[in-house]
Image (cartoon, rainbow, N blue to C red):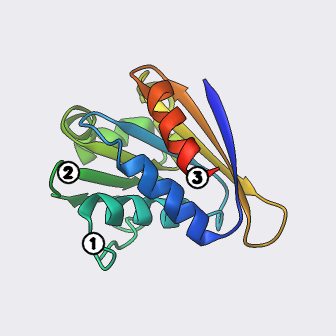
Amino acid sequence: MEKTVDIKNQAGTEKLAASLAATAGAGDVILMHGTLGMGKSAFCRAYIRALADNPDEEVPSPTFTLVQVYELEPLPVWHFDLYRLSDPEEVHELDIEDAFNEAVSLIEWPDRLEYLTPENRLDIYIEPGSNPDARQIKLVAHGNDWEKRLDSVTGKVA
């Protein structure tokens, strides 16, 4: 199942991320695809702030640490940036399997996972839109109840 949403600006990206966060459940794996500067980190930051119900929640990029863990209520979020990994086996050192089972996993540069990519996941592809601030965001559901959740999420944003 696939849905595409045209976003006018960063506020629209934040609204989509917050709508998606409202449907969060333990074991959710969300893979963020897009080139540098497309807004993967901005989407993740908005998602985490919405789940924390705190617009001022400090959400540093995991570029150098590779993972940031947020012990939020109602569930934890693990934000991964796999850009600097060269071998998919390196993700085991990040305890990624724990995140897949117990938390929401937001993963930037998921191509580094290769054969370790979970079957049940949501792929989010962020591409340029019609102007410099706009984005086209494609949501591709794989397994679980993503299809039902995406109907609710995209209805609030589109």
The disc labelled 1 sits on which kind of residue? Asn
Front one among 20 and 114: 20
Give the residue at mark 3: 157
Give the residue at mark 2: 76
The answer to whether one can see residue 19 in this image is yes
- Left or right, 157 with respect to 84, comes to right
- Point out the tag, 2 or 3, that comes first from the N-terminus: 2
Q: Could you tell me which residue is drawn at 35 percent across and 42 percent down? A: 23
Please count the marks in the image. 3
Q: CA distance from mark 1 to mark 2?
A: 14 Å
Proximity of marks 2 and 3: CB atoms separated by less than 8 Å: no
Q: CA distance from mark 2 to mark 3?
A: 25 Å
- Left or right, 134 with respect to 57, comes to right
Give the residue at mark 1: 54
* Secondary structure under the numbered disc 1 in the rendered image: loop
Q: Could you tell me which residue is drawn at 23 percent across and 58 percent down? A: 69
